[in-house]
Amino acid sequence: MLKGKTALVTGSTSGIGLATARALAGDGANIMLNGFGDAAAIEKERAGLEKEFGIKARYSPADMTKPAEIAAMIAATEKEFGSLDVLVNNAGIQHVANVEDFPIEKWDAIIAINLSSSFHTIRAAVPGMKKRGWGRIINIASAHGLVASAQKVAYVSAKHGLVGMTKVVAIETANHGITCNAICPGWVLTPLVQAQIDARAKASGKPVREEEVALLSEKQPMHKFTTPENIGALAVFLASDAAASITGSAYSIDGGWVAQ
Ligand code: NAD
């Protein structure tokens, strides 16, 4: 369905972003990868995407805390592939602490990466999408874009902001063939969540598996993780023609987390 189109997924060297890039490539899109990590491992993923799916894949090392690098990444994508049609804002980090102990530099980094980077990518990508009369913007928010948890002041603020940004962009682009939606996952077992489980196990002295079950059951009626591939499949649907009139929505994929 996406043959001849180009998708950029921020933070696609790991977890949800990588699975989403793979899903979009599987649907025929050329891919611009982005994110940090081991250069050889990233090159292996990039070349693997080309071989497995018969598409073109490139990699941008742009740092999502740096607006100039973000603008250059969007320009490079349009130059390399001729267009940027599907923008997935996925890069994100986490830090857990009570508000009075929350390090200021962690607040600044989370707001920059989890919120402001999407403003910078969207403002640079929309003119081209408007010109071509087609675009899909998919923001990876979170259940924490809709409800809160203790000790996540920066993350919850950023994700609520991202859901708000999604609505504004949806309204502004509604008659330009562009849709803008948020995906709100519950727990997905990726390095970002594994770090939280490991920290809990270290603090409690309990086995990691026990903390994994505890983490799930505290929040989700469904006691299992959503997979990164589940998120990728939803992104492919939102990029499809079937979803052409879905815009400004926040899609929960969270084992019932926010239904409570
Ligand atoms: P992850 O840690 O596996 O991947 C994060 C990606 O972001 C990596 O590719 C990393 O290199 C990249 N990244 C981090 N800082 C960056 C920067 N400054 N510039 C460019 N790239 C940067 O995490 P994940 O769990 O796959 O999370 C992906 C997104 O999904 C995040 O926005 C996260 O908030 C969201 N999310 C995750 C879960 C979950 O349970 N894992 C739930 C809801 C939402």
Image (cartoon, rainbow, N blue to C red):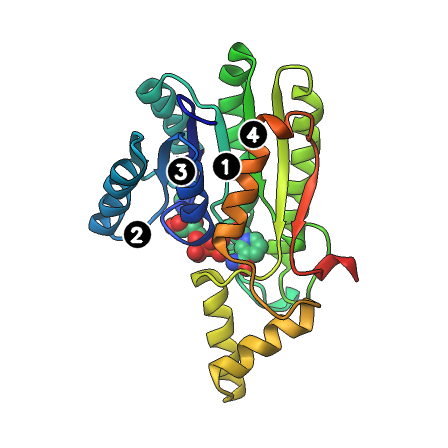
Badge 4: few (under 14), some or many (20 or more) residues near its Cα, within 10 Å?
some
Residue type at tag 3: Gly
Local secondary structure at mark 4: loop
Q: Along the horizontal axis of the image, is 149 left or right of 96?
A: right
Q: Which residue is mark 3?
A: 26
Residue 37 image label: 2
Q: Which residue is mark 1?
A: 88
Q: Is residue 80 above or below residue 116?
A: above
Query: Looking at the image, which is closer to me, 204 or 133?
Result: 133
Q: Are marks 3 and 1 in contact (CB under 8 Å)?
A: no
Image point (54%, 86%), residue name: 204
Q: Nearer the viewer, mark 3 or mark 1?
A: 3
Compute the Cα span from label 2 to label 4.
Answer: 30 Å
Residue type at tag 2: Gly
Q: Along the horizontal axis of the image, is 256 left or right of 192?
A: right
From the top left corner, tell me how far across and down residue 15 is, in percent. 43, 54
Image point (54%, 40%), residue name: 235
Residue 94 visible in the displayed image: no
Q: Is mark 1 within 8 Å of ligand 1?
A: no
If you read the primary sequence from the N terminus, does the residue marked by circle 2 or circle 4 appear first?
A: 2
Q: Is residue 210 above or below residue 173?
A: below
From the top left corner, tell me how far across and down residue 114 is, in percent. 54, 46
Q: Are marks 3 and 2 in contact (CB under 8 Å)?
A: no
Local secondary structure at mark 1: strand
Compute the Cα span from label 3 to label 2.
Answer: 23 Å
Badge 2: few (under 14), some or many (20 or more) residues near its Cα, within 10 Å?
few
Q: Is mark 2 within 8 Å of ligand 1?
A: yes
The residue lying furthest to the right in this view is 260
